[in-house]
Structure formats: structure tokens, C-alpha cells
Image (cartoon, rainbow, N blue to C red):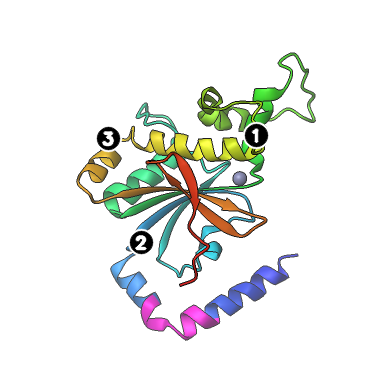
Amino acid sequence: MTDSLIKGFKNFKKHYYERDRSTIMSLVKDGQKPKTLVIACSDSRVDPAILFQAKPGEIFAIRNVANLVPEYNPDGGLHGVSSAIEYAVRDLKVENIIILGHAHCGGISALCKTFTEDKNKIETEETKREFIGNWVNIAAKVKNNINLNDKNESLQHIVEKESIKNSIKNLYTFPWVLKSIKDKKLNIFGWWFDLENGEILSYDDKDDKFLNISKKDD
Ligand SMILES: [Zn+2]
């Protein structure tokens, strides 16, 4: 079952370790210096390194259910996402943070269900989840910004995009993120990957719209 992964690794080794030895050795000797932090979903279809054809050392990635950023909360809890953001911004001094959302996100689908489902519905052992509900609730407040009866776009896509905007807002609550933005050392982007059409839409805060940035051929 893992044969294809081992085959893939051998191919990777051939390309990066045998053909490009100097790049690997400088990553070992000088450490990593990625310019971009990508916060992506754990979904197997949206691996940022594959989507952006990135090389080792190019992208610092955080992946979690529904590509969410919690609010700044230094309460001594186990904050995996916040600690990775802290390392990327304060130690690696990345220049860009991209929140990479995507269409057909299972985590966002779980959140949408809480907006529309009957609150009295009884959960069974089979349907009950112990962690996902609390986690996706990070984006629960987007419910206030949406029209549940909007027929122009599916609720799922609307919430996926609103949740990206919410994660951007939450990033601003980290004081050292805010400082780096004010010092013009850090840029924040909200991107949404349209899985079936193979396009990326970027959030434009001036017009409060997601615009296609992958149409133009370079
Ligand atoms: Zn997802």
C-alpha cells in the first residue's frame, strides 16, 4: 500500500539529492529560509507544495482541518497553529502569509451543518466527533456575515471564503504579526483554490471580493 510513496520518494531523491546536491547542502548548512508561510487544509487534494511546485526550503507550511487560524491567546495551552505562526514570523521572518482555503472542504462542510441543522438532532456514537466541532467553531462567527438563503453561490463556498477572511482577521490579533505588517515586512493573502476548475482566487479587501489570479498565462 505504501509502495507508490516509496517509489515517489526514490524519484524525489534522484531529483533533489543526486541532481541538486548543492541546494540540499546549503539547506543543511545554512538552515531553512522560506519566504512564505502557507496555512492550508489537511485535505489530501490541496498540498501547497504540489500546487505551487515548491522546492524543499521554499514553503513553511501549517496544515489543519479547514486551514483555520485561531485568535491570539497566550494562555499556556497547547497551541500548535499559533506556535508555528510564531516561529515563521518571529524566527524565520517570512515575508508572506497565505491562508489557502479550498472548495469542497470537509471541515467547512462540518461547520455549515451547524448553521443549518436541527439543534435537537441526537448524535449517535457513529456520527459524534470529539475534536472537529470545537476546532471548526473558530470560524463560527462568519455566520453573522452571510445570508443563509443566498442562491447565487453555494453556502459551502461562501463559508469557505468568509472563513479565509476570518482567519486573516485572527492573524491581525497576533501583536508581532500586526507589527511586521505595519513595518511593511509582512504581507497577508487569502487564497481560495477552486478544485474542479483548477483556479486560484485571491481576496481583495478593497472591493471585498475574491478575484481570479490564475487565469493569466505568464
Ligand atoms: Zn479542507
Q: Amino acid at mark 3?
A: Pro
Specify the quadrant of the image occupied by residue 22: bottom left
Please tell me whether residue 19 belongs to the stretch shown in magenta: yes
Q: Residue furthest left?
A: 183
Tell me the SS state at disc 3. Answer: helix
Please tell me whether residue 66 belongs to the stretch shown in magenta: no
- Image quarter (top left, top right, bottom left or bottom right) of the N terminus: bottom right
User: Magenta part of the protein: which range?
Assistant: 14-23
Numbered circle sitting on residue 175: 3
| Res 130 visible | no
| Res 199 visible | yes
Q: What is the chief secondary structure element of the magenta stretch?
A: helix
Q: Quadrant of ligand 1?
A: top right
Q: CA distance from mark 2 to mark 3?
A: 21 Å
Q: Residue furthest bottom?
A: 19
The residue singled out by tag 1 in the image is 155
Residue in the image at 43% along x and 36% along y: 79
Tell me the SS state at disc 2. Answer: loop
